[in-house]
Amino acid sequence: MGHKGNMAIQNPDYNPEWEALYNYHHEQRIRLRDEKETKDFTDPEFDRLSREQNFHHSICLHCLNSLQHKTTQDYARWLFSLSLKPIDKNLIPPFESFETFDQVDRAYDYAKSLIKKREKLQRCQAKPGRPDGLDIFEKTANNRLHTNWKHYMLENFIGEPLPDMVTLVTVDDRKTVKHVCFFTDDHEDRKFVLPYLKYLAGAFITEDTGMRYVDYCTARKKSRMFKLWPKLRRSRLLPDYHFYVHSMPHSLHDETLYKFRMDHDWDANYRPERAHPTSVIMSKHYEKTVPQALIQAVDDHIGFDDLCLERC
């Protein structure tokens, strides 16, 4: 059923006698509840009384949720008034826009979910600042800071396919050093950042250098030798990569910035098939302190509404 302008949408189930109907069934469910309390739960009579009580209870709910409301707009005003916590007006669509009770229910559930999420975030979110006083992911005169969405078609280091990964990546580029941060929360596309971090890191390096990760390991070893013996410097100096994960609140931790180091197999010259990070090891975690640029990146590219904190 459509509507024009501010015209209210009539409720075909409205019953002007709803209150009398409610009172009758409410009295019956109270009577049955009291009678049940005199029975043992193993008594077959207990089950019969429970079924009857549930029937009368369902009629009471139907009176409150449907029969008492003349219009969809009446239902919306009633439902949103039930919230024990104030709902920001920005979260409530104009009541005139609702055409069905289902639309009202979805809008109410969505507004309540945002309130719950905001409470979780306020309880567990980090403060903007410098982790251990470091100016990482902070704009300075000597770096380039940028954030982008990245879609990686991952594979392991022997070429076997892994799940695709879509994640937000912030890079603090300092010429010979690059700090790279992957974002993770409970969203389906982003929740496996930590388990696949070594492959994400390898994919990032491949994209950034244009080299297969195996070749990067070999070249990196050579570039270290060139630092020691300048006369042998015949290759470009490859950057050092430092990898981080910005993790939103979780049941096991508050909002946290993790730093990881990758263990490389530096025998790549001799056994290139083994040139991969054998493990990714957390070397530091900064709980409750996250650089402002990383917090801002989430606000700008994801936004509060699309944050997923299911396991918080």
Image (cartoon, rainbow, N blue to C red):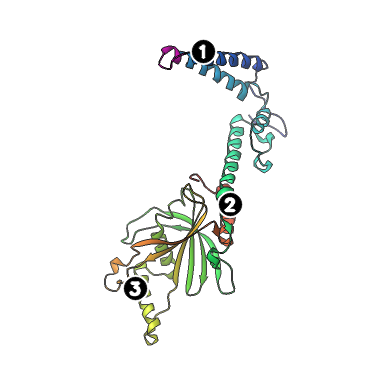
| Residue beneath disc 2 | 303
User: Which range is magenta?
Assistant: 39-46
In percent of width and height, residue 63 lies at: 61, 20
What residue is drawn where x is 65% and y is 20%? 14
| Residue beneath disc 3 | 218
Disc on res. 35: 1
Q: Is residue 156 part of the magenta span, yes or no?
A: no
What residue is drawn where x is 40% and y is 16%? 42
Is 26 placed left or right of 196 in the picture? right
Is 53 placed left or right of 202 in the picture? right
Is 296 placed left or right of 223 in the picture? right
In percent of width and height, residue 259 lies at: 46, 62
In percent of width and height, residue 247 lies at: 49, 54
Spatial separation of the CA atoms under disc 3 and disc 1:
81 Å
Q: Quadrant of residue 30?
A: top right
Determine whether the residue tagged by mark 1 lies in a helix, strand or loop.
helix
